[in-house]
Image: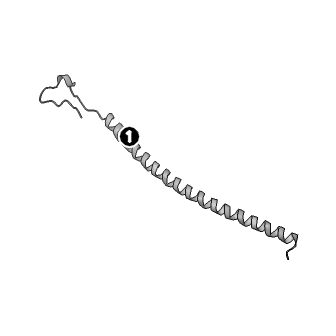
Amino acid sequence: MPDGKERDNTARIQKLEETIAFSDHTTSELNSEIHQLNKTVLDLVRRLSSIETRLIDLNNRLDDDPGDVPPPHSAGPDIPRDPL
């Protein structure tokens, strides 16, 4: 028959094992969440990079000099109204 000290040690060991099991479970869940967040961030970075590239391209197009294009109201039948 276990004495009082042995019962206390058994209870302490059981408490420690429960705490470790809970910590392991929590760590596993957090690891899954971090993995999912990392995938989301990488996708957002890829999308932002694509948007940035498109904006730079559009900005470069705006900077292009269309040359001497007459205003639309003076365009005749042989001159296109849209300079681009």
- Residue in the picture at 21% in, 32% down: 82
Residue located farthest toward the bottom when viewing the structure as drawn: 1
- Residue in the picture at 87% in, 70% down: 5
- Residue in the picture at 87% in, 73% down: 3
Q: Secondary structure at mark 1?
A: helix
In terms of image quadrants, where is residue 2? bottom right
Left/right placement of residue 38 relative to residue 57 reads: right
Is 38 in front, or is 52? 38
Is 69 in front, or is 6? 6
Which image quadrant: the C terminus? top left
In terms of image quadrants, where is residue 48? top left
* Amino acid type assigned to the residue bearing label 1 in the image: Leu
Left/right placement of residue 49 relative to residue 10 reads: left
Residue 36 x/y as whole percent: 52, 55
Q: Read off the residue under disc 1.
A: 55
Q: Residues within 10 Å of mark 1 (few under 14, many from 20)?
A: few
Q: Is residue 44 above or below residue 26?
A: above
Residue 9 x/y as whole percent: 82, 69
Left/right placement of residue 34 relative to residue 77 reads: right
Residue 42 x/y as whole percent: 48, 52
